């Protein structure tokens, strides 16, 4: 069982509000990721981090921002939510192990609906 | 260009049969190829991986093959059960690259 937690699981919020999706992992992994996924669609990497104070944009452009001040914590923030931000956001972490590579552990996801 | 492709159409099979899912890629040289299972509304869960120098890997009812010449992996579920119904994603893991490259997934439906 993966020790990676996301809150909230479900959030309905009005347009223009600021939101932060929380993600924590207790495995001590250096690498953390945020993916965006619409129902029935593929995963899109929007942010990743290789360690504390290291963040990079992913393959899909996103108006969200992330921070990595502590190894275990990787929050995602939207300064002004819009209906186009409605989606599922999945947080994940991994650690490179010689012989098995990077196995990614996902959280349960945060479903965001912007009305 | 680089791309990774899985069967785009859903796979419907009868309980007890073997399900075979395909993952093809171009212009990548992965060190590992991984398979994940994703249930609706949940995050993907790691199932198993195969290394670039391995041809076949088994885990219980699961079998994965890896052909680096064809740039293809096949994922088999033998004696399939309705509980195996889910979306299955393949992912390429480059040497120490950190980011996995995910396929779009194939939805499997096993009918009783």
Image (spheres, coloured by chain):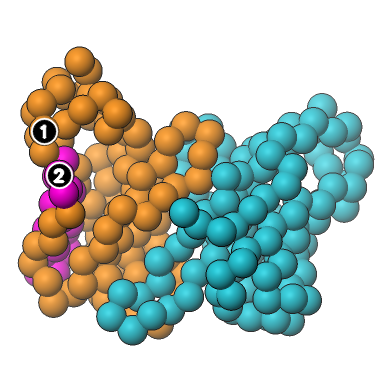
Quick one: label 2, few (<14), some, or many (20+) residues within 10 Å? Answer: few
Q: Secondary structure at mark 2?
A: loop
Which chain is in orange here? B
The answer to which image quadrant residue B94 occupies is bottom left
Question: Residue at label 2?
Answer: B61
Q: State how far apart marks 1 and 2 are (Cα).
A: 7 Å
Mark 1 vs 2, N-terminal side: 2
Residue B43 colored magenta? no
Chain that the image shows in cyan: A
Q: Residue at x 61, y 67 (%)?
A: A26
For the image, the number of numbered tags is 2
Q: Picture quarter containing residue A33?
A: bottom right
Residue B42 x %, y %:
51, 39
Q: Which residue is mark 1?
A: B79
The residue at the point 35 percent across, 37 percent down is B87
**Can I make out residue A48 in this image?**
no
Residue in the picture at 27% in, 46% down: B6
- Please, what is the dominant secondary structure of the magenta stretch? strand
Could you say which is closer to the camera, residue A81 or residue A72? A72
Which quadrant of the rendered structure holds the N terminus of chain B? bottom left
Chain of the residue under label 1: B
Q: Chain of mark 2?
A: B
> Which stretch did the figure color magenta?
B60-77
Residue A5 is marked as: none
């Amino acid at each position: 069982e993966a020790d990676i937690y996301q809150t909230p699981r479900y959030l309905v919020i009005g347009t223009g509000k600021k939101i932060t999706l929380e993600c924590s992992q207790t495995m001590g992994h250096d690498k953390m990721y945020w993916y965006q996924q619409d129902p029935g669609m593929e995963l899109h990497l929007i942010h990743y981090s290789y360690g504390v104070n290291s963040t990079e944009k992913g393959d899909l452009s996103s108006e969200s921002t992330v921070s990595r001040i502590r190894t275990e914590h990787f929050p995602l923030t939207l300064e002004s939510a819009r209906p186009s931000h409605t989606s599922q956001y999945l947080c994940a972490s991994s650690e490179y192990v010689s012989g098995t590579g990077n196995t990614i552990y996902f959280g349960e996801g945060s479903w965001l609906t912007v009305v | 260009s680089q791309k990774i492709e899985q069967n785009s159409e859903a796979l419907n099979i009868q309980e007890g049969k073997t399900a075979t899912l395909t993952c093809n890629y171009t212009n990548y040289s992965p060190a590992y190829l991984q398979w994940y299972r994703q249930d609706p509304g949940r995050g993907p869960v790691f199932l198993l991986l195969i290394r670039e120098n391995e041809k076949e890997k088994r885990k219980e009812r699961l079998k994965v093959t890896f052909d680096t010449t064809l740039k293809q992996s096949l994922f088999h579920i033998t004696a399939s059960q309705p509980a195996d119904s889910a979306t299955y994603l393949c992912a390429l893991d480059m040497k120490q690259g950190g980011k996995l490259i995910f396929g779009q997934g194939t939805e499997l439906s096993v009918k009783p």
